[in-house]
Image (tube, helix red, strand yellow):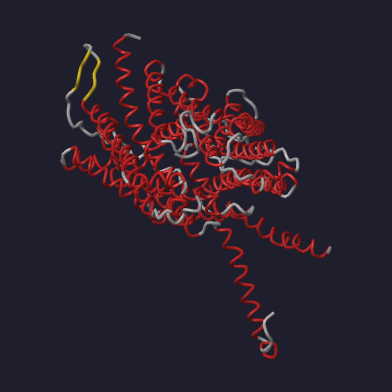
Amino acid sequence: MPERAASPKLYWAIGAVPLAAGLIVLPHLLSFSQQEILVLLTINVLLVCSYRLLTLTGEWSLAHAVIMGIGAYSSALAAKQLGLPVPLSMLVGAGAAGFIAFLLSFPLLRMKGFYFLIGSFAAGEIIRLIWKWSELTWLFGGPKGIKLIPPFPDIEVFSIDFYDPANYYYLCLIVVTISLVILYRIEHSRIGLTFHAIHWQDKLAQSVGVNTFRYRMLAFVVSAFFAGLAGALYAHYVGTVNPNRFGVEEMVYILIWAIVGGTATFYGPILGVVVLTVLNEVVLRALNIDQMRPMLYGAILIVSILFLPQGLESVVPKIKGWLAQRRQKRAIAKPPSEAEQPAK
Amino acid sequence: MTVELLLQTIVNATYAASYMALIAVGLVLIFGVMGVINFAHGELYMAGAYVIVALYAGSGVPFFLAVFAGLIFVGLLGLLMEYGLFRPLRENPLGGLIASIGFLLILQTVAVLGFGIRMRHVPPATQDTIVFMDGVVLTYQRLYVIVATVILLTALWLFLRKSKFGWALRACAQDREAAALQGISINQTARLAMFIGAALAGVAGALTAPLVAPTPFMGHAVIITAFIIIIVGGIGSLGGAVLAAILYAFVYTFVTTIYDGTLANIVGLLLMLIVLIVKPTGLFGAKERA
């Protein structure tokens, strides 16, 4: 048994080294504008992975983009109005997103399915309207939002300048990697198993003493915390936030990434966001049809829900199975004496 | 608030209630029969408005003929959705909802590519107004909307209560499998519901086009309004949707007139959240479906 337990870890270690090396080298292979996209992609990976944690409990929220916005707004305000150092304000932003999610969970988690979907949509729209509201322009800046958000401070000892997207990418990479490890650990802990139990058998889970409301709240709050962190990373990179940035369109993109990638595995949503972003940047930019972007995303969404309802992640085991089959066939074909024996 | 302003606000609210009812009833009909929340319903409304932009404002087709063309065109869009999206995804209601989000993006892009991203102003079909009480104004354009709503909803009510197809539709909404066992064609009923539901949104869009200045993104506000109405009225209840449309239109119009539009939106959404929490079946809906 110990060998078996060790072998996947070994695979992990062997796979992680080139992956890490690739991720570190990557920005130096790209142009400036591609580096900027890479930063946003890294932030979006965190966003969609945090979304997946919530879907583990079976709920599909339509407020996730707005919750990301709460992180962005709170972090921006904490840095700009209260003068907090930016790394601290980012944590404040993430915490604020988690706290708002905690408050929202009392009304929203009383609902399920369609009702939760629409309820979360309404809650998100209310928050967006509050940002836009003329009475609160002094705080949130109305429809134009907040501008001139303090950037991440330079580390002068090493002369690292975070205006450079490559450096900000490394910062994001570190934050996102740590966050993903935490999310992964949560999913594979007892808590994560309970989330699965609530999704598939909530009555049974309740009957064995699981407080389903609390666990759903936990999923909602943790997912909001990391979405808020993604929002904070975004705000201090771009330097401006506004209500429309976190609108329905952004939410639709999160949904598309998650659905096209698939949500059954941890890597599914990451696959979705990476593949679609690369497709978007390479294909659309080459064809110069940026206006058609929503249409193509819509078409991809429809095609994937019709023909690939399990997402891109379902392609991976298929390829694995296909490769294994080929290997088996070749193994059978090679020694002619064995070929006459019936296949195992 | 003076009496005139009060009456004017009531007139405005009646107009708002009319087109909101048309949209919400269509959405409820689709949900009742298909079991799918059609997220693209606001974009169907937008499509109706753009038919007017293209035919009436662009090519000089008479207004009511263009409205009729809008009804047919958007109804056909509904058939397309039924055939291409909702039928293959019948066993997967969440999938249907997500596919309708994809369809929404496509419709928006088509509108942007075809007509540009900017607002289009449509001249009103008539400048005539009715003035009563020396200052309370009701334009004919708004009157058309109110009258059309009353006619269409009455016709729909008669159709559902009196005709064989209407009975089939209601049977399907109650229990799809039991209806199929009685020899009702599920596909045909679904087509019918989608056509009627979409066409109602299309008519609403066509009739209000001269009053609201269409943009490709006008559907967003409409779908939020429609959600509020169907939740407050009780998902799946047609009568509830009409009553809730009236209630919401009056609340919205009065809050807008007295305070401001953003606050009115917030109040509307809060109303919906409270209903969702306190009575998820809606104020007027007795059962899950009707």
Q: Position of residue B62 (x, y in %)?
A: 16, 39
**Where, quadrant-wise, is the N terminus of chain B in this rendering?**
top left
Q: Position of residue A16 (x, y in %)?
A: 69, 58
Q: Residue furthest right?
A: A2
B121 sits to left or right of A30? left
Q: Is residue A137 above or below residue A313?
A: above
Q: Quadrant of residue B52?
A: top left
Q: Is residue A93 above or below residue A271?
A: above
The one of B25 and B49 positioned closer to us in this rendering: B25
Q: Is residue A131 above or below residue A288?
A: above
The one of A94 and B103 positioned closer to us in this rendering: B103
Q: Is residue B139 above or below residue B198?
A: above
A102 sits to left or right of B225? right
Do we see residue A147 in this rendering? Answer: no
A123 sits to left or right of B209? right
- Residue at figure coordinates x 28%, y 43% from the top left: B115
**Where, quadrant-wise, is the C terminus of chain B in this rendering?**
top left
- Residue at figure coordinates x 40%, y 36% from the top left: B238
Q: Position of residue B147 (x, y in %)?
A: 25, 30
Do we see residue B252 in this rendering? Answer: yes
Q: Position of residue A324 (x, y in %)?
A: 64, 73
The one of B164 and A246 positioned closer to us in this rendering: B164
The one of B222 and B59 positioned closer to us in this rendering: B222
